[in-house]
Image: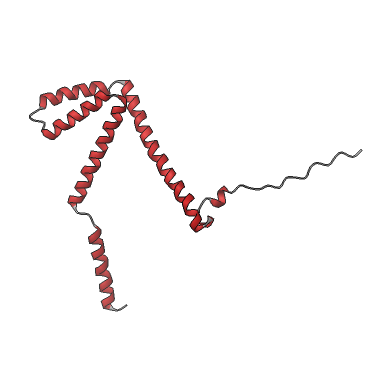
């Protein structure tokens, strides 16, 4: 390669990497959205077990958004009620089961997506594309010949 081509390739690679990089503002926005979605999931799972706990969580979140200084007394009262509710063994076990159910549901959906990919992709690529085809083929064993009758 000539010197000009090398410089052009390097500059285009640098330009491509900087164009695809996310800015700190974009990263902060994505992190805020992720935390908001996580909190909404926690509230939905709590609502499955105890609707009052979910309401307390929503009220505490709204007070945090308004500012804790103006509503410190009300926030501490809600926090005390929240702690009493979540420390009950029945709620704890129900919430734990709800989390496990959510995680297993996501795993099942991922497995179904993988199965659909291989099922719908075989018509195009054939069995050579499926990495498990040769491992899951039914094995055909020949039957042994029937035993001979005893001689008399």
- Residue 132 shown left or right of residue 83 in the figure: right
Q: Nearer the viewer, residue 6 or 102?
A: 102
| Residue sitting at x 44%, y 50% | 117
Q: Quadrant of residue 149?
A: top right
Residue at image coords 29%, 28%: 46
Q: Does residue 65 appear left or right of residue 87 in this picture?
A: left
In x, y percent, where is residue 143?
72, 45
In what quadrant of the picture does the C terminus appear?
top right
Q: Residue at x 11, y 33 (%)?
A: 66
Q: Is residue 100 above or below residue 110?
A: above
Furthest residue in direction bottom, as rendered: 2
Q: On screen, 92 above or below 32?
A: above
Question: Which residue is nearer to you in this view: 30 or 80?
Answer: 30
Which image quarter is the N terminus in?
A: bottom left
> Residue 108 falls in which quadrant of the image?
top left
- Can you name the residue that lies furthest to the left here? 70
Percent position of residue 147, x then y: 80, 41
Q: How is the image coloured?
A: secondary structure
- Which residue is rendered at x = 18% and y = 29% of the image? 60
Q: Whole-percent x and y of residue 121?
A: 47, 54
- Above or below, 6 against 30 in this view is below
Residue 13: name its quadrant.
bottom left
Is 15 drawn above or below residue 83 in the view shown? below
- Position of 78 with respect to 1 (left or right) is left
């Amino acid at each position: 390669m000539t010197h000009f081509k090398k410089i052009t390739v390097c500059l285009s690679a640098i330009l491509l990497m900087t164009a695809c990089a996310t800015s700190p503002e974009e990263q902060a926005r994505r992190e805020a959205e992720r935390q908001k979605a996580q909190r909404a999931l926690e509230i939905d799972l709590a609502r499955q077990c105890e609707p009052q706990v979910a309401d307390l969580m929503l009220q505490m979140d709204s007070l945090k958004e308004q500012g804790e200084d103006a509503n410190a007394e009300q926030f501490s009262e809600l926090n005390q009620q929240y702690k009493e509710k979540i420390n009950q063994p029945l709620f704890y076990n129900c919430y734990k089961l709800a989390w496990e159910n959510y995680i297993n549901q996501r795993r099942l959906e991922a497995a179904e997506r993988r199965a659909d990919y291989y099922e719908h992709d075989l018509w195009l690529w054939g069995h050579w594309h499926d990495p498990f085809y040769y491992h899951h083929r039914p094995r055909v064993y020949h039957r042994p010949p029937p035993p001979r009758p005893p001689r008399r």
